[in-house]
């Protein structure tokens, strides 16, 4: 029988690129045993010559040796960003060559264009590594749950911020100490702002919700707040209330619209997602047939992402050799869904007021909350000081965001309030 071979070209030899090539070499026999196919990396390109040290025989700095080669079946794009990556993916697909990418910014920004191009040219696109590292969540939503109407996604989708929040909570590290550790382990994006401010999570959530709900939500339409304002004090206090703070991706069907958002969220310590620590990610799904399911695994780091890249390469390799048709992906369809405005959402809230410790202060705060229809569930004052402002911590019953913002605006203008109030939403 003729030997089945899939030849791979790699663009970008950073953390994920290096782990991918090493993984293909290390597990060559396992891959062959499981698939009957020989997977081989024939070329790897990076603008930085130093990156080629481990693979001198196949390394190049000229991308034309990957993009214009007739001997490459799949191009693996691991450069990141949306400019060069978009141009190179377009070039590859236009020639009818399939692409595997880990690039969530590219898929969420340019998904419509590239999936259309792939279909026109009968090429495949694999993007499992773009969301939640090693967790096979794209495959699960697209294939395993194909027979479900999905109604809800909750996700911890960013390893860097989860690692930072965990370290701040366990080691009492400062935000910046925890961030540099995350960068040292290669979890953070080249620009850590994408992680910290929640944009990396927003990109990933837009991809999952497109697949889950078969409708487009452009990532810029998703309300987002990052973790940069979380103070170690909030982590300690919310712990005492029995909650953990997580950067949570939320998407749930509400009537004809979609409640979709990313922000720091209080999760009760009994909630399964509250126990997801460090660089781990988790995705919770609700479907009309499957019910509630939870996926858990390493969300960032070279090997975790490379594992998903390899799975896409295998999937596409098998299709290329059997000549089947590409999956239908909804990114190019004109199927926008209305995003429910943030002011319309209802949830429970944690507030940290910084207020003077004198008679009548709590009454003034609760008066404003009451007038805005916000009901208090519990209150703690941690310190006592007649001269200085002290933290007052509060949990509310379910309230509407619009009224919460209005009330907190009024409260923050009181002369007894000395700092802007911290607001964190609760998810149950
Ligand atoms: N910066 C990302 C994270 C890498 O921290 O999750 C994986 O997408």
Image (spheres, helix red, strand yellow):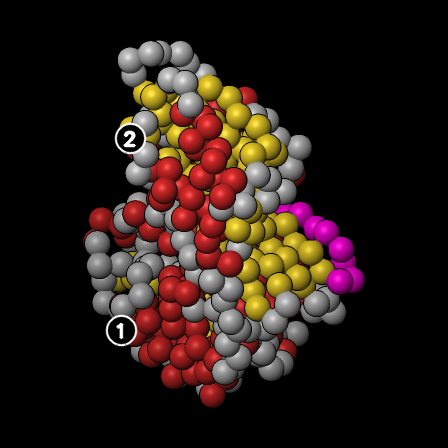
**Residue 306 horizontal/vertical position (percent):** 47, 52
In the rendered structure, the answer to whether residue 193 lies left or right of residue 203 reads: left
Q: Does 236 sit above or below residue 221?
A: above
Disc 1 crowd rating (10 Å Cα; few below 14, some 14-19, many 20+) is: few
Identity of the residue drawn at 47% across and 50% down: 403
Q: Secondary structure at mark 2?
A: loop
Q: Does 298 sit above or below residue 87?
A: above
Q: Does 3 sit above or below residue 427?
A: below
Q: Which residue is mark 1?
A: 64
Magenta stretch: includes residue 391: no
Nearer the observer, 220 or 317: 220
**Image-quadrant location for residue 355:** top left
**Residue 418 horizontal/vertical position (percent):** 29, 28
Is disc 1's CB within 8 Å of ligand 1? Answer: no
- Residue at the bottom extreme, as displayed: 120
Label for residue 415?
Answer: 2
In the rendered structure, the answer to whether residue 384 lies left or right of residue 292 reads: left
Magenta stretch: give its range: 288-297
């Amino acid at each position: 029988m003729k030997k089945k071979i899939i030849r791979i070209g790699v663009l970008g030899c950073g953390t994920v690129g290096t782990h991918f090539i090493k993984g293909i070499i290390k597990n060559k026999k396992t891959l062959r045993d499981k698939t009957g196919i020989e997977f081989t990396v024939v070329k790897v390109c990076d603008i930085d010559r130093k990156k080629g040290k481990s693979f001198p025989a196949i390394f190049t700095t000229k991308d034309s040796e990957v993009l214009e080669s007739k001997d490459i079946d799949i191009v693996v794009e691991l450069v990141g960003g949306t400019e060069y990556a978009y141009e190179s993916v377009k070039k590859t697909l236009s020639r009818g060559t399939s692409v595997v990418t880990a690039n969530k910014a590219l898929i969420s920004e340019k998904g419509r264009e590239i999936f259309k191009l792939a279909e026109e040219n009968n090429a495949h696109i694999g993007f499992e590594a773009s969301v939640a590292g090693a967790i096979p969540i794209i495959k699960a939503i697209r294939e395993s749950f194909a027979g479900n109407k999905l109604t809800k996604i909750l996700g911890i989708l960013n390893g860097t911020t989860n690692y930072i929040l965990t370290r701040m909570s366990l080691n009492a590290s400062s935000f910046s100490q925890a961030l540099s550790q995350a960068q040292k382990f290669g979890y953070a994006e080249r620009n850590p702002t994408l992680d910290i401010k929640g944009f990396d999570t927003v990109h990933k959530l837009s991809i999952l919700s497109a697949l889950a709900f078969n409708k487009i939500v452009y990532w810029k339409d998703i309300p987002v707040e990052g973790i940069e304002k979380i103070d170690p004090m909030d982590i300690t206090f919310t712990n005492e209330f029995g909650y953990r703070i997580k950067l949570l991706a939320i998407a749930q069907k509400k009537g004809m619209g979609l409640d979709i958002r990313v922000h720091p969220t209080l999760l009760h310590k009994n909630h399964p997602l509250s126990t997801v620590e460090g660089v781990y990610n988790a995705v919770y799904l609700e479907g009309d047939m499957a019910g509630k399911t939870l996926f858990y695994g390493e969300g960032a780091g070279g090997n975790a992402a490379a594992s998903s890249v390899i799975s896409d390469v295998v999937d596409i390799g098998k299709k290329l050799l059997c000549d089947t048709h590409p999956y239908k992906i909804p990114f190019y369809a004109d199927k926008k869904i209305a995003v429910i405005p943030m002011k319309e959402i209802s949830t429970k809230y944690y507030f940290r007021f910084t207020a003077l410790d004198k008679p009548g202060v709590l009454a003034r705060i609760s008066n404003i909350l009451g007038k805005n229809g916000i009901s208090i569930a519990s209150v703690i004052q941690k310190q006592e000081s007649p001269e200085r402002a002290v933290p007052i911590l509060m949990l509310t019953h379910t309230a509407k965001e619009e009224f919460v913002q209005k009330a907190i605006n009024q409260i923050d203008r009181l002369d007894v309030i000395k700092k802007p109030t911290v607001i964190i939403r609760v998810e149950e």
